[in-house]
Image (cartoon, coloured by chain):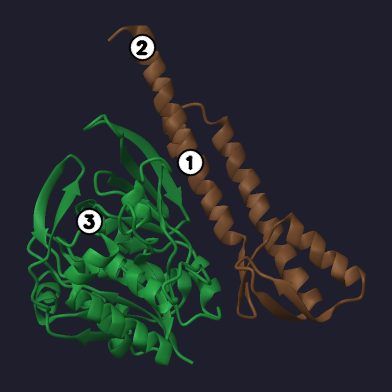
Amino acid sequence: MTKGILIFAHNGPEVDYGTMSIIAGGLAKKHLDLPVSLVTDKWTIAWLKESGMYSKAESTFDKIIEIEKPRTKNTRKLHDGFYSQTIPFVNSNRFSVWDLSPYNQTLLIDSDYLIFSDRLNEYWNTDSSVMLGHSMNDITGERSGILDRRVSETGVHMFWATTVMFTKNEESRFFFKLVDFIKDNYRYYADLFRFDPRQYRNDIAFSVAKHIMNGFETEFVYTLPPILTVFDKDMLHEVNGNRLTFLIDKPLNCGDFWAATTTGVDVHIMNKQSIMRNKEKLLELV
Amino acid sequence: MDERLKAALDFSNYRQTLAIQRKTLKEKIEGKLTYGHSGGIFKIDRTLLAFVQMLIDKGRIENVPLIDQNENPILIPNLQQFLDEILDRYFTATYEYHEEYEKIKSSRTVEKLLNI
């Protein structure tokens, strides 16, 4: 049975997801010792070529799978520390991972999830067709709110689709078809599960699908570990080997920071611009 | 700013960085103490180690069902091999935990904490 990692990357005007996926893919390949493939589009490939990163992409990825870039009206407010901007957000095609993945067992990760340990390798043989990140775990342990834990104040448990592990079988096929259906009927499910429909979020669609597939029950049969997360108001300040130094936004003290480091732990860095500011150092690790 | 307040705020920053460092270290060790075996996920802790050792002492060494961290029964074909593995992982992780924790504990400034 083949195992591998898959990353989706569609560049936007402000974020170079292509290069970020090389960093995330390279680190995942190094620490999990598994092949990594990329799902992307011709525009992102063209930019990788223009920016001189395509050869690095070819050496990092087992396969580069080119698809049509999905059209999107979806936007998100992206912070870079103190600053923020609203940008287009292409995230509506994750459901297609079942068809696109070249592996029997796939670990799907976000391009801003940097893997520095082999922890996720423990989960490959687990008796479960689809596993999602159990929850989000803020680096300080103090800043997550109800909407990080549930899809709405009164809604179901929110899993995090930053990490998704699945085995190709009928059950997982149904799951991803259901995610697609929820995406297509997002406003209906927003009414039903009481979440905010203005921005399509994979975390929510996957959580609702998981809830439905569990027979409308919240049952944590098997999940992937919580996602250690550094918010986009925080900043990746420095990379020194496997040690990442962050400036952590102080709640209620806008523009003031704590300092913290991580070493040897997988970390979801939501401030994409700060990943890109450190790309040379990160690419050295790949 | 008043010197007394500045000193207190500096110390507060140090304590917060210390707390984050301890938290991320704990998570790193928790990851190392997670063990996937025979389709189950086990948290390696003193209870599991003692229980497995007790089963072996009682002569239960082959095809033994253990309850994993998700409360599912997982059949372990060779319990001695299982014990050897979890014992090895436990000591590797806890020695690392101790070593890193000592470094954190002895770092009295934010700069030193960040350089661990």
Q: Which numbered disc covers residue A272?
A: 3
Which comes sooner in the sequence, label 2 or label 1? 2
* Mark 1 lies on residue: B21
In the image, are marks 2 and 3 on the same chain?
Answer: no
- Residue drawn at 77 percent across, 69 percent down: B83
Q: Badge 2 sits on which subunit?
A: B
Q: Are marks 2 and 1 in contact (CB under 8 Å)?
A: no
Q: Is residue A146 above or below residue A31?
A: above
User: Which chain is represented by brown in the image?
Assistant: B
User: Which chain is represented by green in the image?
Assistant: A
Q: Position of residue A179 (x, y in %)?
A: 28, 78
Disc 2/disc 3 C-alpha distance (Å): 35 Å
Q: Position of residue A219 (x, y in %)?
A: 50, 69
Q: Badge 3 sits on which subunit?
A: A
Q: Amino acid at mark 2?
A: Leu
* Mark 2 lies on residue: B5
- Residue drawn at 60 percent across, 80 percent down: B39
Disc 2/disc 1 C-alpha distance (Å): 24 Å
Q: Amino acid at mark 1?
A: Gln
Circle 2: element type: helix
